[in-house]
Image (cartoon, rainbow, N blue to C red):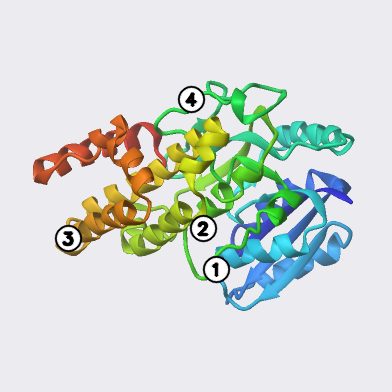
Amino acid sequence: MKLITFTVPCYNSAEYMDHCIRTLLHAGEECEIILVNDGSTDDTGAIADRWSAEYPGIIRVIHQENGGHGEGVNQGLIHAEGLYFKVVDSDDWLDEDALDRLMEQLRRAAQMSEPVDLFICNYVYEHVADNTQHAVRYRNALPVDQAFGWEDVGRFSASQFMTMHAVVYRTEVLRQAGLSLPKHTFYVDNVFVYQPLPSVKSLYYIDCDLYRYFIGRADQSVTEENLIRRIDQQIRVTKILADSHDLEALERNNKRLALYMYHYLSIMLMICTIYLMMSGTAENLAKSDALWQWLKETHPATYRRMRYRSANVAFLLPGKTGRDIDLFFYKLLRKIYKFN
């Protein structure tokens, strides 16, 4: 068995996928790399096949009709043979020194009678336009270099949560959780991280800057323009998250896990609300009201928790003046943290 499967969904990635693949190959024969060519119309498929021919014991290629990022992840998970599973987008890459540290811990985990369910590493926003970086780290919230449970998890800051870039799941945890991402939908990386969390019993945080998250292409889904244009998909994903678990029931059995999941869901709701405000259209302002009304009707306990927690109250000020204040502070945070 391989220690880890790296799944790389690729759509028209010919210009940049080579760099990503080279960094993953640093893990050597203990990894497998599954390149999923998601109906590309450029040379992505041919490039993937060349890599597979050069490294037949490590790299495999799946060619599929276009199904979106989520279907690429689904196919990687179906075919994965690694003990652990990580998604790496084709325009991103991994730091090789940090990858050495991760592989060392995966070797140790493989020898355990009950391997760790979830490894967490830091990730770094790589801003190509101005050649700056911003690292997201978790040392304030998670024990470092030791296995721990949810009861040991501390408080995350308002702008801090574990994204797809940070997590390395044990493959069987994802399968037992029944993870299957929707096709033709953006922002499903949030489902990938969030939905399996109640299946996680043990965690391990490695304080190293592993994942390098490329920021700077105009066609990226996280640009302001695309977030507004695809806001219906962000709303859809947020509703999938809210529907996936009864957080009130979960809190009775695992308070720390539930608190973190409330935190994650809160951030997703705030993203929807802010970008609906930012668009400035009456239609989108109505969608914001409708989203919160939906949450109130379908998940009343979660609504009360989300709507009236202090951070959300600050970001849901009434009227045009309230929206202007909300957007001012959001843009200030974006300038500081440079998350898109």
- Going from N to C along the chain, the mark reached first, 3 or 2, is 2
Where is mark 1, residue-wise? 68
- Image point 47% across, 38% down: which residue? 131
* Amino acid identity at mark 1: Gly
The one of 157 and 21 positioned closer to us in this rendering: 157
* Amino acid identity at mark 3: Thr
Q: Based on the displayed image, in which of its 4 quarters is residue 329 positioned? A: top left
Q: Position of residue 18 (x, y in %)?
A: 68, 56
Q: Is residue 47 left or right of residue 236?
A: right
- Going from N to C along the chain, the mark reached first, 4 or 3, is 4
- Going from N to C along the chain, the mark reached first, 1 or 2, is 1
* Amino acid identity at mark 2: Val
Q: Nearer the viewer, mark 4 or mark 3?
A: 4
* Disc 4 from disc 3: Cα separation: 36 Å
Disc 1 + disc 2, Cβ < 8 Å: yes
Where is mark 4, residue-wise? 155
- Going from N to C along the chain, the mark reached first, 4 or 2, is 4
Where is mark 3, residue-wise? 281
Q: Based on the displayed image, in which of its 4 quarters is residue 61 positioned? A: bottom right
- Image point 71% across, 60% down: which residue? 77
Q: Is residue 197 left or right of residue 219?
A: right
Tell me the number on the disc at residue 188.
Answer: 2
* Amino acid identity at mark 4: Arg
